[in-house]
Structure formats: structure tokens, C-alpha cells
Image: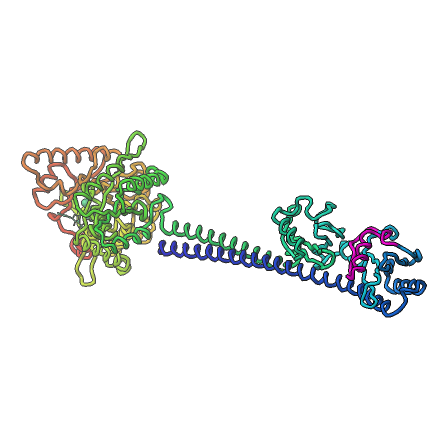
Amino acid sequence: MDEKKLQKQLIRITAITVLSSIILTLIGFGIWGYTIKSAYEVKHTQLKVEAVEYKARILKQMDKNMQILTTLSKAYEISTITDEPERLEKSLMATNSANDFISMIYMDKSGVGIMHTPGFGTWDNVTLDECNEYSAEAIESALQGENAVSKVFESKVYDGKLFVYAVPVYKNNEVVGALAASDTLDIFKDISNGNVIMNGSGYIHLINSEGEFLVRSQNSIVQEMYNTIYEGRILSDETKERIDSALKKGISVSGEYTYSGEKCHFYIEPLGINSWFLFCSNKVSDSIFFASNILTAFGGIMLVFVIVVNILLYSGWRIFNKNTKSLIKIAYSDPLTGAENTARFDHDFQIIQSERKKFSTVAINIHNFKGINDLFGKNKGDYVLCYIKKIIDENLKDGEFFCRDTADLFYILMLDTDEAVITKRIRKIIDYISKASLAYGEYSYELSLYAGVAIGGDREKALVAMQSIKNTHHTDIAFYNHNMHDALRRKNSIESQMYPALQNREFKLFLQPKFDIKNNRLIGAEALVRWQNLNGSYRYPNEFIPLFEENGFCIKLDMYMVERACEQIKEWIDSGITPIPISVNQSKLLFSDFNYPENLMHILDKYNVSPSLITLEILEGVANNNLERLNQQINALHEKGFKISMDDFGSGYSSLNMLYQLKIDELKLDRGFMRKAAKEDEERRKVILEQIISFAHKLDITTVAEGIEVQEDKDMMLSLNCDFGQGYFYDKPMCAKEFSEKYMKNKQSD
Ligand code: C2E
Ligand code: MG
Ligand code: MG
């Protein structure tokens, strides 16, 4: 997984998501704004159109009434009816009832006339003074030769508002009188009833050039009963000025005002009569709502959709981001210490390589980490690992990195290539870590580390270098060289061959005799393994036993060798030969297995061999571990009847005290004791050997001298009272068949 690529992708996805959301939102707002504006403009235009239409309707109606009067006037012109009061009265009555006028009047030039009001009768000699002021004005205008419509007035007779149409009556092209008819405001009924225009969202009023309401809609947007449109500070000063100017000029004007927090727009259209104007108004919000209710719903759905998509995208992105981050974390880090893991190390390593930087890879490990876990528990082991992580972390330079592989194996990439510098830096780290000594009861356990360095090399080479000093406690830092790789190749080759070799019985039983030093009698043999290659050549134990100890294969091989020893003993017994005990070398790994005694018995039972014929040789190093546990195991083996021998005593750090503590049966003195010392130390060597042998005897432990090569060795061991001897002086290890031929033939029982 390439984290940087993934992060780039994440950033790209995020940017695209955010950008498309912004664009989508902007487009949405744009469409929304445009739609609102369009709806507003459409409604405003509609307001104008409807006002003009309404005006046309009113004018048409008024024109019709005026036409009736004009036609009647023409009739009067060509007749003598105006001179005949009775006919004139009848004519007025007939026209009145046919056209639903409230009253009709004919007035001659002198200002005297006849008036008929249905339901009230006819008045003669009515003068202008008796007429309503506004109707008198209209009649006077007609007498001046003009068609006229009066202003609206409150009638004294009729309950309601009226206005008057008046036309001149001619004779011989001269005005001889005026014909007038009063009418109700039915014509403006839509206004006064509060009926609305624009499908119910607008209201209309009739005003004059002073802005006074002539006919006021009952359902006006403005609730207060103001007399003029200028009252109540509803219109802004600027709007008032514009309206006033337009009204004076008799032209149309439009604009906006705000009432009760709601925006409204208005349109004023001149009626063309008496400086009357239609004042139309509606609420912007209403109009837009009505105009765009479908769009509003659609827009709402769109908005919800965009929000939901964005929320989904955002939460999806967050989940993706979180998962990716935790996946990267899991994939690239070590959960225990928080350090990075080898996958991350190798990824960063490739970058360092591609940048052609100078570097070294360091592998670092604790000696016997398993022992720490066993001794102090897993938690303490984990603590040690975290502590190592912390120390390495604190000792890195800029650009350097490290990781934990498995268990206690750490790798560091250092940007140094000088051996001395690297050594100094590693030693500093090792010293810091070693200081964190662990307390075990009253003892303290000091951590000891070792490291392998590959200058310009990878983890594998650093590991090879490190493993080359795994079992040496005197060196703590090793630098990689080619020979190490050969050793590793050999190791790999052996490891790949060991299992098939065991299956194919390539591991052969060799026996080396053991003699009683005093009388040279054969008292037993030691089983020594030889790995016979397919070409017949042999590999010796020192080539593979240490590796098998390390990888655990020794457990299998040792049990196999016990079986081969039993097989041999059985063969002797079956051939009528009195068997001799065989000592078998046993790995210390076996001693920590609780089932070990039982497993051994399985093999012995299979060949019907008595445990007294098998001696188990353990290396003195076994005793470095838990003595109590070891004694338990020895006891269990004793109970079965096995003898226990301690091998190579004196080669390591064994002490006589340990002899006292361990319940062994035999002590094999390491062949190192046979090597002659300098003259002045010769006496010391003998004293030590004598002491060991005598101490062993006191504890009922028999002694075997290993590596007796010459007569002198044998004589010395005889003089020191050692019981048995083994070595080239007597004989070399040989294959079991040869051994039987050579040593067992004469042991034929009768
Ligand atoms: P060891 O158990 O101390 O075996 C004695 C070693 O000393 C043998 O080496 C033997 O050949 C060698 N030797 C005997 N007499 C003389 C002598 O006079 N002079 C000298 N210089 N050497 C002598 P070998 O067979 O190479 O075995 C080496 C070690 O390998 C053994 O030491 C033992 O620790 C281990 N080993 C051998 N076979 C097995 C096995 O089956 N299982 C295990 N776990 N270890 C084994
Ligand atoms: Mg041995
Ligand atoms: Mg030995």
C-alpha cells in the first residue's frame, strides 16, 4: 500500500467533492435567485398588464354610459323635445329605467333644468345650485361643450357614492343645454368590494392626483384607514417624490414599499378621467410564492437532495478516511510498541535507496529475550520492548527511521556509513537500554544486547551480521561481510535438508567406547551422531548441532538417536549379546518438556529396553536455567530408571556448588582438562581435577575423563582416581555395526 498515493487520492476526492458541492450550491443559488427575480419581474409585469386591462374595462363601461348620453343628446338636437317639458320628462324616465342610472337631468343654458329620479319622481326648474357640487361642475363643463365625468360624491338621496356623466346638447352647432346622468360606483365594484386582481394576490384602489383614496379596497394590504397613500410613512421619501411627480404629470409609476416587514410592490396607472389613477399593489412574497410554488417545491427537494448528498459524501469520506487511516496504521505499525513495522521500514528504505543517500541498516536484539519473558513474565517483556522503542526513537537523527520486526528484533536505518561513528551510536543505544536492568528478587538482571550492521545493505544483511554473534557474549556489534553470507547459506541449506534427512535415516548412530580406567574393561558407549550425505561423506555434529539447538530440531534428532540406541541394544539382546549401557546426548530443550520422561518410555517400551541401559547426557549449560525445575525433571527420569550424566563439565561456568545441587549420576570432565597447561599451572590443573573427582565421589557421582588421547592422559586420570575414560587413546567413535563387530562379539552370553 502506498500511503502517499492514497493520501493524494483522498485529497483529490475531497477536493472534487467540496468543489462540486460548492458549484452545485452556487448553481442552485443562481437558479434560485434568477427564478425569484424572474418571478418578481413576471409578477410585476402582470401587475401592470392587469392594471391596464382593469382600466380598459372601466373605461369601456364609462364610455358606454357616455355613449348613451351622447346618442340621447343627438336625438334632442334634431327634435324639439327640449322645448316640450312633458316629452322631455318621459324621455328622461325611459332612458333612466333602461340603463339603471340613479337619476337623469337636462339643464338648459340658463342653468335651469328638469331632473328625474326613479322612485322619487321628477323635479322641474332644478337649478345648478341645487345640484351636488361635483355634479354641478360636470354639468357646467358640458354646458361649456365638453363631455365630463364628475368626481365621486356622497349622495343625499341615494344611499351611497355616486358620480355623474355629462354631455352637451347642441342645436345649430351651439350648446343649448347639458344632459347628465348619475351612476353608482358599481363600475368600481371590484375595487370597493376588495376584490383582487392577479388571481387573488393583488389589490386595487382608485386615487386622485393628490394621492387621496377615492375608492379604497376593503382588503387593502395596508390595514390603517389612511386618507392618502402618503400617510403612515409607508412609502419612502424617494418613492413619495416619484409618485407625486408622476401623479402631477398624469403618468404611470411603479415601485416597492415595505409594510409589516413584508416587501410589496405597486403600480399606478392614470385612468385618463378626472386625474384618477388606479393604484395596484401586491405582496412580493405572495406573488413569488404563487408564481413559483412548483419551483419552490422542486427547489426544496433539490436543496434537500444536495444537502443529503453532501452529508452522505462527507460521512462517506470521513468513514473512508478513518478506515484508510486505521488500515494504514494497522498495515504500517507495530501494535505493541507503536513503532513502525517492517512493511513501513521497507517502504521508506526503498525511498532512501532511490534518493541515492548513504545509509546503514542496523539489526539489534536482546540476548535471551525468551528468558526475560519466562523469568519476569510477558508484561515485563512487553515493557522492555516499549522501552527499547523509546530509546531508539530518542537516538535517531533527522531522516532516520526504525521498526520492530518480531519479538525483540529491531531494525534501524542510520544515515551514517563510518564504522566508528556507527559503533559509537549503537553502543550509546545499547548502554541506555542496558541501564534499564530488571529486578529479580534481590538480584538485578542486566539487559544485554547485540547488533549487526550492514553498511549500504538491507535488513537481511544486517540480520546475518547480527546472527553471526548471537552465541558470543564477548562481541556486541558485528559488521556484515561476505563470509557471513556463506555461513548463512550453509545454514539455510542445512535447514532445508534436515527434515528429509531424518525421514531418510541419514543420521547415523556412531558409538565411542567408554572404559574403566583401572582395569581397561568396556563399561559403556556414547552415541554420537553422524550425518551421512548421499555421496557417503559425513557431516560432524559441530556443523549442525548448534543450529539444531537454535531452531529446535534437536528435540526430534535426540529422540531419534535414543531410538537408534534402543534399536542397537535390542539387536544385541536379540543376538544373544549382553548389552552395554549407551549414553545419548540430549539437548537442554528436552528438559523443559514435561512429557519428556513419558516420551522416552514410549521409545524404550517399543524396543523393550530397560532405562538402566540408557544414560542421558546433558550439557552443563542446562543448569544455568531453573535448577529446581531441572531437578524435578531429573527426579522424574530417575524414577523411570534412567541415569543422568553431566557432559563437558568444566568447559563453561559450572561450579562445584552446582554439583551438590543437581542429582546427577555421572560427571564427564571436559576434554579441555586433558590439554597440558604451562609448567607452573600443571600442578593447579591436577589439584582442581583431584578436587572435582573427590567431591563427585563424595556425592556418589562417578567420573568420566573425556578426550584421553595418550597413555599419559590415562595415567594421570588413574592417579587422580577417575573412574572411567573415553577418548582416542581407547578408540574413536565408529559406526554401530563396526562397534558391534569390534567390541560386542566377545560378550556373547552363554
Ligand atoms: P560430546 O558429547 O562431548 O562428545 C564427545 C566429542 O569428543 C565427540 O565429538 C567425539 O568424537 C570427540 N572425542 C572423543 N574422543 C576424543 C579425543 O580423544 N580427542 C578429541 N579431540 N575429541 C574426542 P563429536 O562426535 O564431533 O561430537 C561433538 C559434540 O556434539 C558432542 O560432544 C555432543 O555435545 C554433540 N553431539 C554429538 N551427537 C549428538 C546428538 O546425537 N545429540 C546432541 N544433542 N548432541 C550431540
Ligand atoms: Mg557427550
Ligand atoms: Mg563431552
**Magenta stretch bounds:** 127-154
Quadrant position of the N terminus in the picture? bottom left
**Residue 195 coordinates in the image, percent (x, y):** 76, 56
Q: Residue furthest bottom?
A: 78
Left or right: residue 219 compared with residue 254: right
Q: Quick check: can you spot residue 735? A: yes
Relative image position of residue 718 (x, y in whole percent): 12, 39
For residue 305, what is the image quadrant?
A: bottom right
Question: Would you identify the image quadrant in which residue 150 lies?
Answer: bottom right
At horizontal 17% and vertical 46% (from top left) the residue drawn is 418
Q: Classify 20 as above or below 598.
A: below
Q: Position of residue 474 (x, y in %)?
A: 18, 41
As drawn, the residue found furthest toward the top would be 442
Nearest the camera: 379 or 258? 258
Residue 135 inside the magenta-drawn segment: yes
Q: Is residue 448 left or right of residue 318?
A: left
